[in-house]
Amino acid sequence: MNLVYLFIWFWLLGIGIYTAGNFIYWCLQLLSDEKRISFVGCYLKVLKLVNEEDLSHQRLLNKFVQRSLRADGVFILHLISKNAGDIITSDIIATLWKNFLEDEAEKGREGPQAPTLDDVDGFKEQLDKRPLN
């Protein structure tokens, strides 16, 4: 009977060590800007949507990952990649990339605009959300 408990104890210890290692791996993947950019960039390079040598493509890729997807979006893409596969992940990333490029082109046509005083840093939305006492 003691051998069963000993086996269960080592089994749970092994699972705990594996879980801790996996948690550290995911944290390092998500906290590193380079890892996030390379993860998304690999899919875009395979689809030939980004040229590795073109500096403007690199800037757009950095902006896409850091401002559009951010860490939580890349995390979701990692989960989709692990659970649904690379084909679905590449389709999703390609669609997000095309939408991002369309938004950037639209912003470029409008030209730079200064925010109104009511909407600096979303201040107006914050005021609208506060309950009146």
Image (cartoon, grey):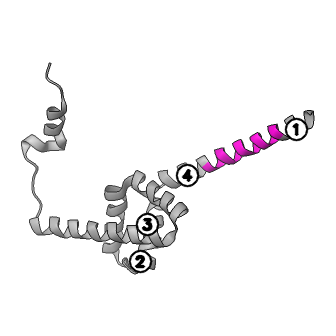
Please tell me whether mark 1 sits on a helix, a strand or a loop.
helix
Q: Earlier in the sequence, mark 3 or mark 1?
A: 1
Residue annotated with mark 4? 26
- Other residues around mark 4 within 10 Å, as few (<14) / some (14–19) / many (≥20): few
Which segment did they paint magenta? 8-22
Question: From this viewpoint, is residue 28 visible?
Answer: yes
Please state which of the two labelled residues, at mark 4 or mark 1, is closer to the viewer.
1
Q: Are marks 1 and 2 in contact (CB under 8 Å)?
A: no
Q: Report the number of numbered marks.
A: 4
- Seen at 9% across and 52% down, the residue is 114
Tell me which amino acid carries mark 4: Trp
Membership of 19 in magenta stretch: yes
Residue on which the image places disc 1: 4
As displayed, is residue 73 above or below residue 62? above
In the rendering, at what x and y percent does residue 70 appear?
A: 37, 54
Can the viewer see residue 59?
Answer: no
Using the image as rendered, state which of residue 69 and residue 113 is in the foreground: 69
Residue 26 in picture, x, y percent from top left? 55, 52
Picture quadrant where residue 127 is located = top left
Mark 1 / mark 2, whichever is N-terminal:
1
Q: CA distance from mark 4 to mark 2?
A: 26 Å
Q: Which residue is mark 3?
A: 40
Mark nearest the camera among 3 and 2 is: 3
* Amino acid on which disc 2 is placed: Glu
At 36% across and 72% down in the image, what residue appears? 94
Distance from Cα at disc 1 to Cα at disc 2: 56 Å
Identify the element where label 3 is drawn.
Answer: helix
Q: Earlier in the sequence, mark 4 or mark 2?
A: 4
Give the residue pinned by disc 2. 52
